Image: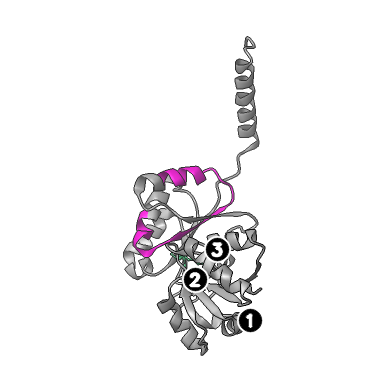
Amino acid sequence: PGTLYVVATPIGNLDDLSPRAARVLAEVSRIAAEDTRHSARLLAHLGVSTPMLSLHEHNEARRVDTLDAYLEAGESIALISDAGTPLICDPGFVLVRELRVRGRHVVALPGPCAFVTALSGAGLPTDRFTFCGFLPAKPGPRRQALEQWQTREETLVFYESPHRIVHTLEALRDQMSERSVVLARELTKTFETFLQGTPEALLVQLTEDPNQARGEFVVMVAGAPPVTQSEHQNIGADALMKVLLDEGVGV
Ligand code: SAM
């Protein structure tokens, strides 16, 4: 049987495709791509003529049997998305999960990923972080999501689209006003920038220079300050009181 290769592709700069990735894309029998027209440009750049078939969120479940049959017939397949690492806010999870259940050989090639690139250039703590994916688009659910992350002490990482970046900064100003935020914009591209500041300061910068609000963003937020010893003790006392009351102990 063949192998499924999960292949990360560039997030802007085509030179970031590894020689190994290029070789796999040239050698497999087929490439399953999120958008075949989009990926045709990458393959043309590489001089690769491997046939493609589409695999996106709307047909992924149906594609599993087709791709499994190719593997059974001894064909190897590469999975790519429009940019970066497949499965990271991109299609592929259902396919990889199902092929693993069926005992297929799956090989993942390391390569470009926007949030890893952003974290490695931001200067925020990276010993622990939470990747939160995209924030909900609607204001209510977005506020709830941020509330859920508010007390986390590790660095928070979000993906964001250009038309929502100002809304997200406004929500951060309302809910995490004191935090240091880093915006990584247009990573690996000509106009790559890292902007750092409080949500309010960043909103001012984006208003003064609207070019800074264009393009693709990774938003990183410094974690909440650690809970102090005395706050811990208070929490301890409150929790103890609750247990005693629940037990019916007269206090
Ligand atoms: N699979 C991709 C990865 O590995 O990073 C992510 C795909 S997701 C659909 C697209 C989001 O990734 C964008 O909205 C943006 O938040 C982030 N992103 C992708 N390319 C980027 C870049 N060059 N600079 C900054 N953010 C980028």
Rendered image quadrant of residue 2: bottom right
Disc assigned to residue 20: 1
Choose the circle earlier in sequence order: 1 or 3. 1
Between residues 59 and 171, which one lies in front from this camera angle? 59
Tag shown at residue 193: none
Give the vertical position of 210 relative to 230 (above or below): below
Q: Nearer the viewer, residue 207 or 13?
A: 13
Please, what secondary structure does the residue beneath circle 3 have? helix
Distance between the Cα atoms at labels 2 and 1?
A: 17 Å
Q: Position of residue 182 (x, y in %)?
A: 49, 61
Q: CA distance from mark 2 to mark 3?
A: 13 Å
Q: Which quarter shows the C terminus?
A: top right
Residue 172 visible in rendering: yes
Magenta segment: 143-167
Marks 1 and 3, Cα distance to the nearest angstrom? 22 Å
Query: Splitting the image into 4 quarters, where does residue 77 fall?
Result: bottom right
Question: Residue at 60% of width from left, 44% of height from top?
Answer: 226
**Helix, strand or loop under label 1:** helix
Q: Position of residue 78 (x, y in %)?
A: 57, 75
- Which one is in front in this view, the residue at disc 1 or the one at disc 3? 3
Residue that label 3 marks: 95
